[in-house]
Image (spheres, rainbow, N blue to C red):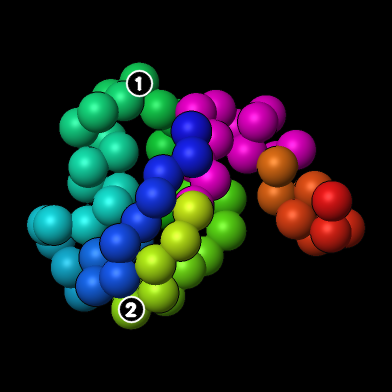
Amino acid sequence: MVIDKPAGLTVHPPGHSAHTLVNAILAYVPEIETAGTDRPGIVHRLDKDTSGLIIVAKNSTAHMRLADQFKIGR
């Protein structure tokens, strides 16, 4: 998934138990693989005060492949 994150929205829960992008993703796609992380599906980061597109993988294979592409700059 690709999400247009607005500025001011926290991406993942540490320090925030509600009103985060991860909470919304889990409500919208409850079957997403969480793999024991507080950032299920989140491939890269955007700061709370930054707006922009954020990529979310629905499973661990997709997450690994997308993260690798970010590392090599594709």
Q: Is residue 6 above or below residue 59?
A: below
Left or right for 71, reference 27: right
**Dot label at residue 42:** none
- Callout 2 crowding tier (Cα within 10 Å): few <14, some 14–19, many ≥20: few
Residue to which mark 1 is pinned: 31
Q: Residue at x 25, y 65 (%)?
A: 9
Residue 69 position within the rendered picture, expressed as x and y whole percent measured from the top left: 80, 48
Q: Amino acid at mark 1?
A: Glu
Which element is circle 1 on?
A: loop
Label pair 1/2, CB-CB below 8 angstroms? no
Q: Is residue 39 above or below residue 27?
A: below
The image quadrant of residue 40 is top left
Q: Amino acid at mark 2?
A: Asp
**Span highlighted in magenta in the image:** 54-65
* Observer able to see residue 12: no
| 62 or 7, nearer to the observer | 7
Left or right for 45, reference 50: right
Q: Is residue 47 magenta?
A: no
Which element is circle 2 on?
A: loop
Residue to which mark 2 is pinned: 49
